[in-house]
Image (cartoon, coloured by chain):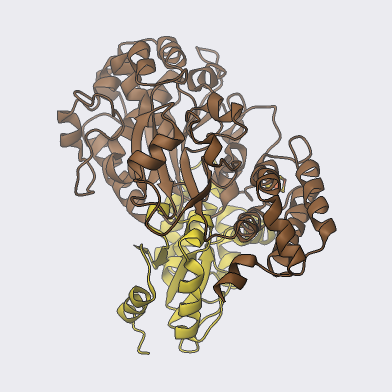
Amino acid sequence: MAGVGEKPLTGRLKPGGEALDISEYEVYGGYKGLRKALRMDPSEIRKEVKEANLRGRGGAGFNTGLKWSFVPTGKDAPRPKYLIANADEMEPGTFKDRLLLERNPHLVIEGMIIASFAIEAETAFVFLRWEYTLAAKRMRKAIAEAYERGYLGRNILGSGLSIDIRVHVSAGRYICGEETALLNALEGRRAIPRSKPPFPQTSGLWGRPTVVNNVETLSNVPHIITGGAEWYRKLSRSGDGGTKLFGVSGRVKRPGLWELPMGTTAREILEEHAGGMADGFSFRCLMPGGASTEFICEDGLDVKMDFDSVQKAGSRLGTGTMIVLDHTVCPVAALHNLERFFAEESCGWCTPCREGLPWVARLLGAIEDGKGETEDIETLREHTGSLWMGKTYCALAPGAMEPLKSGLAVFREDFERHIREKGCPLKMERR
Amino acid sequence: MLSDEERREIEEETRHYGQKRGASVEALMCVQRRRGWVDDETLREVADMLGMSVDELDGVATFYNLIFRRPVGKNVILICNTISCMVMGYERILAHLEVRLGIRLGQTTADGLFTLLSVPCLGACDRSPVMMVGEKLYPGLTPELADEILREHGWRG
Ligand code: SF4
């Protein structure tokens, strides 16, 4: 969009919180990326997005253009093909896609149309969680507007190209965010993950080539096409292209969401944008990008928030929305909360996860209540190994082990005190 | 029994998917919107319409947090119980709601007005603690605000 400068995703949002309608969106240069894309070859679009080094914003950080390039294209490619916008945002602590869906729905739609064009798909779905009722309403309205103006449907802008978008409202289950589980969900099956290979890009929805992209990822695409890969890369302060929606929740002065250059440090986000800790609360630790990321403490705050830097610092960028734990939060209780969530949301397909996570959650609950034994710490530690990558069918269980693994190290003393003093020191202090 | 209107709506939904079963969540939600929950008989009829076995469709229905296979109250309260809301003190709000309504999490009030459920992350972590009643999101909860919301939905405590 013209004049969006440093903030392509949010630079034109209305301060009142309403959605940009189609005319407003067009005034800011909306659908220009699509017009340009229609004059390009799909392979050029894929190349541009790959060179922009746009990495998947759902948490995994895979190069988006590269992901698209695995889809068979050309005359002999199997058809139909599908593009899916993953709007099932359910990672605890994550609230970024909601902003785009609610307030810039046409940007999401334009990104979906260009992405569909890039992989030569004719049908696209928005896979949306039920609780995002406002987003559903606004996306549906925006899709209807896009049809009216000829950006969707038959023969888009006279290009001969046809694309349809449909909103699928899900019914609440974290695992639906996993791309292969999402495919089963869309097919009307229990949303358990599928084994890979085959990858969705060759055998996805109904066995057809399918790409599943996060909402924020797709929202970057129109700008990459309009501004070019080089411009996009330069928005970043690191090797990963573009800006990122960073958020902070917890006891900070101004919890919220900001679009900032990729590679902005955690400290800058926390202190300058979120205003630092709220009065009376001191910083203990943060999770950089949702419930399945390792803790970062004071000494790690200068980490640049991009995929590689956070990984080097021993955690994951994840969704880039940080959860701050302050001195009043019991770390054992926090871990109990996190692991109970993962246990409840396990799809139950494979035994280690189905049986292991509830066990972990129960143990943490026992320690929290002062009923823990010293051996429990070792049992928990063992689980972080037996539920690690490669031991379970999908990444949910290993994701659940990330905070536990780092929590056992960082909060060792808290665990020991709970066991020794037969209760939560924080609760006893408060009494 | 499925009404004609429900049948029409479900048939319309099936048109958007490669196979009819793709519409299973939408079909169940179509029933739930009108009746509050999905009973066995209706589930059987829907399965029939979608060309699925009853067990298969029940397997789908029971998989999701928000498809109810048992009766719920007129207003379903969904309170977020995950990490950001925990840090911001949802437990206090939940305890308050339980006392006000005289029920525990997962239960329905005797007058059938409220069901209290928890949900993982409502995606409004910067405004936590949060809950939804029906389709409306209520951020920044305090016990006082919770009372107001209950009153708004017919609570006379
Ligand atoms: S790891 Fe958990 S969520 Fe993933 S397939 Fe196994 S049981 Fe399901």
Q: Please name the residue shown 77% across and 53% down the image.
A: A356
Quarter of the figure that contains the C terminus of chain B: bottom left
Q: Quadrant of residue A26?
A: top left
Q: A324 or A336, which is in the foreground?
A: A324
Q: Is residue B136 above or below residue A81?
A: below
Q: Which chain is yellow?
A: B
A134 lies left or right of B90:
left
Residue A138 visible in rendering: yes
The picture places residue A95, in percent across and down from the top left corner, at 42, 47
Q: A402 or A325, which is in the foreground?
A: A325
Q: Which chain is brown?
A: A
The picture places residue A13, in percent across and down from the top left corner, at 23, 39
Q: Is residue A79 above or below residue A345?
A: above
Q: A296 or A125, which is in the foreground?
A: A296
Q: B82 or B3, which is in the foreground?
A: B82
B125 lies left or right of A152:
right
Q: Please name the residue shown 31% across and 46% down the image.
A: A102
